[in-house]
Every structure is written in C-alpha cells, then in structure tokens.
Image (cartoon, rainbow, N blue to C red):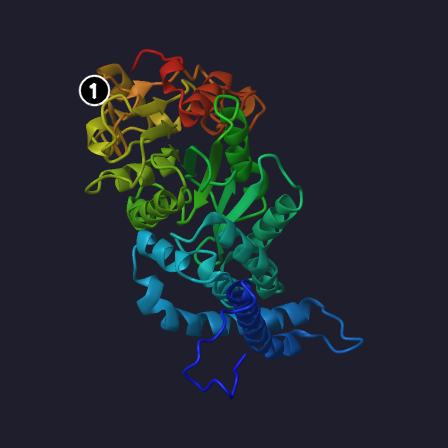
Amino acid sequence: MYDPALGSNAPQPGILNPHRAKAQDVADRIAHALSEAREIDERYSSALRDLKAAPGLTVDRKTWANVAGDVTAVGSAAREYLADQVLDKSPAERKEWWDHLSKEERQEYITSFPDVIGYLDGIPAAARDEANRANLPLVIASLEGQTADGAQDKLAGLKGIQTKLSENSVPPMYLLGIGTEGKGRAIVSYGNPDTARNVSSYVPGLGTALDADFADDTVGRAMQTARDARQYDPSTASIVWLGYDAPGFTDVTSTTDANNGAPAYSSFMDGIQATNEHENPHVTAIGHSYGSLTVGTAARQDGGIPGVDDIILLGSPGTGADNASELNVGKGHVFAASADNDPVSRLPSMKDLVGPGILGAAVMGSNDLWFGTDPTSKEFGATRMESGDGPLPLWLSGQGPTPAHSGYFDEDRNPSAADNIARIVGGRSDSITTEAPR
C-alpha cells in the first residue's frame, strides 16, 4: 500500500491476488455474453410481439393463407437483397457464405426467407430441411381453394409429403425443396446427403408431377433405394429430384423439358458436392424413363454432372448420346437396364418410325431409339444390368399399362434390377449381375 511518508518513488508491493487476471478475463466474457444476449433479445422481441396471437384468436386456414401471402411478399424482396450475396453465386460460394454466418444469422435467414433458403443449392441439407418444413404449411395454405394451373394436384402432392414427414422414417426423410411453379417441384432425400458416403439422385420421367401419387409412388422409390443400398453401406442417402417439368404423353417426344431441366439438375448435384462432409463421396445419378434423357443431357455438358461417379439409366428411350463415353464418367461407370417387356425402352427413332416401324427396326437390327442410341446396346458401350423380362403389359398382368417400365425399383416386380441399383448406389458396382447387351 502507498505510504505518504515514503513518497511516490518508494517500491510498491506486488499484486496480492495472483488470480486477478483470470478473474478479470472471466468477468469480461460474462459481460460480453450479456451484451450479446441483450442484442439478440432486442432483435427478436419486436418480431415475437408481431407473431403472438391475441387471446381467443383462431389460427385457421385463412390465417395461414394470409401468412403465406406475407411470406411470399417478403421472399420477393429477399431475392433482390440476396441476389448479389448468394443467388448469383455458385453452390460452393453459397456454402462458404453460409459457413461464415453466425448461428443467429442463419436462423434469421431460415425464419425470414424459408422459400429462398429451402431451395438454394449449396445450403446444407439440415438447414434446407428446416426451412422447407416451416414453409410447407404456408405453401399448402396458398393452394387451398385454387383450381387453376393444377393447384389441387399440387396441393394433394404437398399434403402427401407432409404426411410422410410425420412418419419418422428410417432412414430419416429430408425435404430439400418444394415449389409450385410448372407441374410442381419437390426434392426429397432419405438419409442426410451431407453426411453420407454414398449419395444417389434419381430423376423421374414421363408423367411425373407433384400430385396425389407422388409421395407414395415416386418418393417411395427413393426410400426403397436407400433401404436396399444401406444393406451394402449404411452410410447412404437416396434422393428423388423433381426439380423440372417432366413431360406428359403429348410432349414426351420433345427434348425441351430435358434441356430446361438439365442445368437445374447439374446445379443441385454441384450443391451436393459442396455440402458433403466427405473428401470424395461416391455419387450416383439415376435417370428413369424420360429422366434418363435429362440426366444424359446434363452429363453431356462440359465436365459432366458435378461430382458424379456413376450413372444408371433405367427404361431409357435414349440419352441424346451415341456412346456412353459422352456422359463424362469414364469407362465402366455407365449402367443401363431394360426389361424385355418394357415398351418405352424400345421406342424407335423418328426415321425408323416413318420407315420400318418398331417391329421392322427390331428385325433390321437398329439400335436407334427416339433420343439416340439404345443405352443397353453393344454399340452404346454401357454395362447392361440384369433386369429380366418384367411383368407383361396392360391386361395381361393386371398391374397397369406398363408395369415393366415402372418396376425397376420394385423388389417384387423386378428383384434383379432393384438389387443391382442398390449395389451400385452403395458402392458395390463390382458385384452386380449383368446380361448381354442388345
């Protein structure tokens, strides 16, 4: 202590408390935490006051619809605000942007702009899932009572997805995208595609839309693939990607839908590559029916589909390619399946149709399908997976008009094809069963 008699130049004793510096550091951290807590409280208090329902207020369908309208308006404004930061960036750049946000900032974006964050390639799957689950009841409410542009079909499809989300499936279901544009949009994964070593993404084809059958039929194929593939590697996620308008019967002969869908599919797969936690995940692109043309169109672009190691083509009317080498995954990594009773995989090319016809083309040995060389032909150069005959068409089997075409994922209709798909997706392509090419 200071002694006046000794003056200011007298030696002073050392600090009596050796823990003073540590105590000050703890006190500073507590003060900083309290300051952050006050900031967060102020940030959310006004929003929470606005969201709090008055006593006796019924949150009915109309209320949800009003909220949906508000969210849509906010989302439109958000796109302008986010354009420079993320919307015009690559999936990898979006992932980097997301990683640099604080936990509180991420939650703010999910809460405020669920329709934007939920559909943004490069945002981690868990965040997209949270945003889409929050947005789902709003989108459903916005479709209630509408009749134009297939609104009721989309409503039925979204309600089917909502039911699936409540089932707590194994592997768990992730909702990676929903939308009402065109015939509807839905991206569903069974298993987390960010943590899985093996990821597959299946593009459906002819007649697929967001409708009453989507959740049970199309989504069910992704679940089946995930469950089967996890027998070969438990670290597997399987996705169904309806991020484009698949054609109906009136426009299935055109390449327009495939050309429009291919860039969106490539962007999505680029996002999978950006968010997956493994250094070199095994990624499989699956195209069924017209979806094989969409996959093929994406694969034929410079560099191929980002991150894809293997390609599976099922019941394909052609990929737009003359040879498997054009799909940019390397020799031995393109697999094709065509059941003998599948009529879609035998659609003749335009020149054969106006010339000898289906039977004539078969007799003459033509390998040309509507959209290019038959992927199961020797000329194409893919590995033909065993897929057997498949059920007979129409009334002969009692299973619908083309059961062989829709049965590749089904263990009951086509066990060999379903098992081969699972082996490839699970990283065991060396153990599949094959058959001679056409």
Q: Amino acid at mark 1?
A: Glu
Residue neighbourhood size for the residue with mark 1, other residues' Cα within 10 Å, grouped as few (<14), some (14–19), many (≥20) = some
Location of mark 1 (residue): 379
Q: Quadrant of residue 36?
A: bottom right
Horizontal and vertical percent position of residue 205: 41, 39
Quadrant containing the N terminus in the rendered view: bottom right
Q: How many marks?
A: 1
| Residue at 46 percent of width and 35 percent of height | 196
Q: Residue at x 27, y 40 (%)?
A: 297
333 left or right of 410?
left
Picture residue at 39% right of the left edge, 37% below the top = 278
Q: Work out whether residue 424 can be spotted.
A: yes
Asked whether residue 213 appears in the rendered view, the answer is: no
Left-right relation of 370 to 64:
left
Q: Secondary structure at mark 1?
A: loop
Looking at the rendered image, the quarter that the C terminus falls into is top left
Residue 60, percent from left and from top: 71, 68
Residue found at x 45% / y 50%:
124
Viewer-closest of 151 and 347: 151
